[in-house]
Image: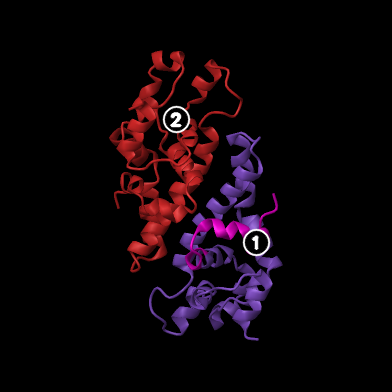
Chain colours: A red, B purple
Amino acid sequence: MNKLQEFQEIIGYHFRQEGLLRQALTHSSYANERHMKKLYNNERLEFLGDAVLEIVTSEHLYQLHPEWAEGELTRVRASIVCEQTLAFCTRALHLGDYVLLSKGEEHTGGREKIGSLGCVRGGDGCDLSGWRICTRKGIYSSFCVA
Amino acid sequence: MNKLQEFQEIIGYHFRQEGLLRQALTHSSYANERHMKKLYNNERLEFLGDAVLEIVTSEHLYQLHPEWAEGELTRVRASIVCEQTLAFCTRALHLGDYVLLSKGEEHTGGREKIGSLGCVRGGDGCDLSGWRICTRKGIYSSFCVA
């Protein structure tokens, strides 16, 4: 089993377009080192992934707690979609082991600073036919602690 | 044609669940004045709508500009999903004319301060079977100027 397959086993979701997962796991330092195409790294997917995390979390809370007012929903969303929670989930999914880093980054402890969950969510957002499907997939439950 | 139908003509989208649009247009002051159920106003939909605006805009820019790096995408998204643009669209859609306000709010110029586009987007997010559909609907083009 290769690394990409291994990671998909961990997150419980198999990409229809595995190339998107590969891109989501490609740090810009690695792409630069290998002289890959300028935008072939995980940064654009991170942009998208931030919004996917936001909508998936929002919808989940909205549906799960019809008795909560806006303030409560906003407060809990902020506590879920935050650096601390993402770092926790990144560790829980062993995501750091699967990100492609340059040798330089590797030597300066870059793997400890990985926060690529957003990129992966960007990838699976692209991969699926609707954002809502993400909610129903196990990958979501891996980071939602509310 | 009643007011709800009129507004749906303006935005070019007809809600399958018209009750969601009614809720999206119900200001908390109106709901309080009429002793409606505690959470029957547009605030929860506004919470959801913020995230809908974010994902719809993000996906649109991501797909439309494959040549843009993350920084450019983020900059343009911030210029679209901001108070100024939403206020512009609110005026363009004459949304202020359709929001239900209390008499008190009405008398103190509340109608001039309406910024309910997010609530409407929350409503249509609930109404549709996937967020992506929003992108394809005319309602989106009414606020996206990028």
Give residue A113's quadrant in the image. Answer: top left
Residue shown at 58% from the left, 35% from the top: B70
Residue at image location 40% in from the left, 61% down from the top: A71
- Residue A18 percent location from the top left of the image: 46, 35
Please state the horizontal and vertical placement of residue B78, each as a whole percent of the image.
60, 46
Give the Cα separation between the discs numbered 1 and 2.
38 Å
Q: Mark 2 points at which residue?
A: A25
- Name the quadrant of the N terminus of chain B: bottom right
Which secondary structure, mark 1?
helix
Residue A12 locus on image (x, y percent): 32, 42
Q: Is disc 2 placed on a helix, strand or loop?
A: loop
The chain to which mark 2 is attached is A
Residue under the image location 40 percent in, 37 percent down: A117
Above or below: residue A115 compared with residue A146: above
Within-10-Å neighbours for mark 1: few <14, some 14–19, many 20+: some
Task: Magenta stretch: give its range.
Answer: B125-146
Which chain contains the residue that carries disc 1?
Answer: B
Query: What amino acid is at disc 2?
Result: Leu
Which quadrant would residue B117 be assigned to in this image? bottom right
Q: Mark 1 points at which residue?
A: B87
Give percent across and percent down for residue A122. Answer: 48, 42
Type of residue at label 1? Ala
Q: Which residue occupies 36% across, 50% down?
A: A137
